[in-house]
Image (tube, rainbow, N blue to C red):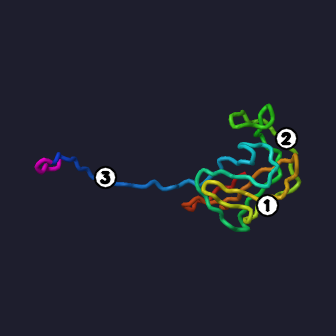
Amino acid sequence: RRAESRGDEPSLLRLPFTVGLLRDRAPPRVAFVGLGRGTPEPAFDGDSFTMYFSEAVQLVMSSVVQMRMEPSTGGAHCSSMGLCGPAGNCSRACSYMPASKVVLLSDSMLEARGATVVAAGLPKLEPERGYKLVIDAGKVRDLSGHAIEFTD
């Protein structure tokens, strides 16, 4: 349609349109974990680490849903050279000696900062032993309220 021109004004084309917003329908997920000196860093000897998520998150403070470090052999996530970097073929058994106990990450140790969660004030972990990060379903939510699925 052409708008009617008034004198020296150019003709304008007027079309109706609708603006819509896409809704967030996906739960957050862990993108990677930074263990300190460089990311990814396979050896950890500090008292804090950072979890990076797919989007901004908030923590659910509850004793029912938790984050923890569980004993682990490392699974099949190593390369033929041992520890695996970001571009490596990481499908061989790591064969770590698992830690002897679970380390609970209490709510007071966790702080959400945008798309990251920092775990600080960790107790000393067992040297040369394997751990894996476990997050219970619902411990982390995105800003739309979608809960993370069980993650290990």
The number of numbered badges drawn on the structure is 3
Q: Is residue 6 magenta?
A: yes
Residue located beneath label 3 in the image:
17
> Sequence-wise, which precedes: disc 2 or disc 1?
2
User: What is the distance, in whole Å, between disc 2 and disc 3 at their CAs?
Assistant: 59 Å
Q: Secondary structure at mark 3?
A: loop
* Residue labelled with disc 2: 95
The magenta region covers 1-8
Gap in angstroms between the C-alphas marked 2 and 1:
23 Å
Indicate which disc, 3 or 1, sits on the residue closer to the N terminus.
3
- Callout 1 environment at 10 Å: few (<14), some (14 to 19), or many (20+)? some
Residue 45, percent across and down? Answer: 82, 49
Cα distance in 3D space between marks 3 and 1: 53 Å
User: In the image, what residue occupies the spot 76% across and 64% down?
Assistant: 106
Q: Where residue 44 sits in the image (x, y, percent)? A: 80, 47
Which residue type does callout 3 highlight? Phe
Image x and y of residue 24, in percent: 51, 55
User: Do labels 2 and 1 touch, CB within 8 Å?
Assistant: no
SS under mark 1: strand
In the displayed structure image, the side of residue 126 where residue 64 appears, left or right:
left
Q: Tags 3 and 1 in contact by the CB under 8 Å rule? A: no
Q: Quadrant of residue 42?
A: top right
Q: Main secondary structure of the magenta part?
A: loop
Left or right: where does residue 118 sit relative to residue 10?
Answer: right
Q: Is residue 37 above or below residue 141?
A: above
Amino acid carrying label 2: it is: Ser
Q: Residues within 10 Å of mark 2 (few under 14, many from 20)?
A: some
Mark 2 element type: loop
What amino acid is at disc 1? Leu
What numbered label is drawn on residue 104? 1
